[in-house]
Image (tube, rainbow, N blue to C red):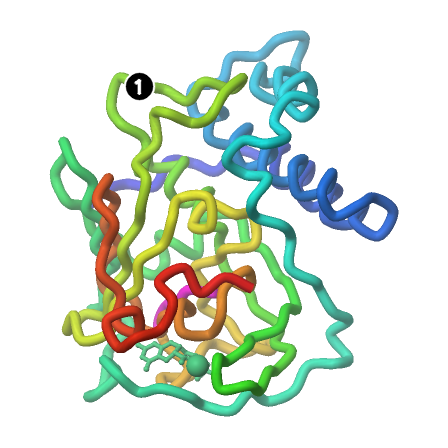
Amino acid sequence: MSKVPPAPPSPTDLSVDRQIRQMTRRSFAVGAVAAGAGALGWLGLRSASLEDGIPWPLRRMLAFNERVAGSLFSETRLAGEFSSDLVTEPRVNGHVGLNGAIDAGSWRLRVECPDRNPESFTLAEIQFLPSVTMTTELRCIEGWSNAVQWKGVRLVEFAARHGFGVKSGRPFEMDQKPRGAFRYVRLETPTGEYYVGLDMASAFHPQTLLCYEMNGKPLSPEHGAPLRLVIPVKYGIKNIKRIGTIRFSDERPGDYWAKRGYDWYAGL
Ligand SMILES: Nc1nc2c(c(=O)[nH]1)N[C@H]1C(S)=C(S)[C@@H](COP(=O)(O)O)O[C@H]1N2
Ligand SMILES: [Mo]
């Protein structure tokens, strides 16, 4: 069982939040680039030393923002966020991999990353990390959508905190594409029946959350308790409920709905 290190205040967290608020005043393209750079900046914070009291990745991020256009993160924009007044009780859709009761106390999130031993995390260890609350649209490929308020931890934050997703000995280089990162993530239910594949830019997008609350209440089993993915830059099919395992790799993972003829990328 891995130990969660004490949580320092997360300046990049604040910085990404601020950038999201600024979206109303900026063009989408500029905001998305800034947010992507924010996610990258946070990855560097694990080993950050202070420069004039500011972790160096944050300083370098400022220069990075200007040069990042055309690289990895420019392809992912921020999804729209809504006032929580617009929240509705979402319908339940899709039960693959949700058969049988699940006990949140004995449930563990298993994380597999090449070149290191698999690790498992309790829900409490995940909830210990700084949380994000956002109201975004869950859009099903069938044509309906719901505004839902989600609470969880950014996948990029969880990964950075534990050093997942980045190849050992190959730290992120802040002034270019994150060549130290694996290219893909696969998430699957505890039984392996439902599974999704994601490109890293989408997986480490600042609005991609490991969620444990929906509309102010703990997730219900049919909505994916104890932990589900919320990824508003993708259609509902990628928002996997009841995550059991997360696996990083360089090979493009299979995907339940892609195998059944839907677009693997399923971007919005
Ligand atoms: N484990 C699992 N996750 C899943 C599905 C599923 O069948 N099994 N269906 C997906 C689809 S198609 C949609 S639209 C959303 C619906 O999420 P909701 O039931 O919380 O509204 O869950 C997604 N995640
Ligand atoms: Mo869906």
In this rendering, is residue 39 above or below 68? below
Task: Write the residue at 52% across / 47% down.
Answer: 205
Q: Decide: is 57 above or below 124.
A: above
Q: What is the magenta range? A: 226-230
Of residues 226 and 6, which is closer to you in this image?
226
Q: Quadrant of residue 106?
A: bottom left
Residue for point 20% across, 51% down: 120
Name the quadrant where ligand 2 sits. Answer: bottom left
Please give the name of the residue rendered at 47% of the width and 50% of the height, measured from the top-left corner.
202
State the image coordinates of residue 128 (x, y, percent, origin top left): 44, 51
- Residue 253, image x and y in percent? 23, 54
Residue 12 locus on image (x, y percent) = 61, 34
143 to 49, vertically: above or below: below
Image quadrant holding the C terminus, namely bottom right
Q: Nearer the viewer, residue 115 or 29?
A: 29
Disc 1 on helix, strand or loop? loop
Instruction: Where is residue 119? Give x, y as percent.
Output: 18, 46
Residue underneath mark 1 = 170
41 vs 105, left or right, is: right
Residue at 31% over, 87% down: 95
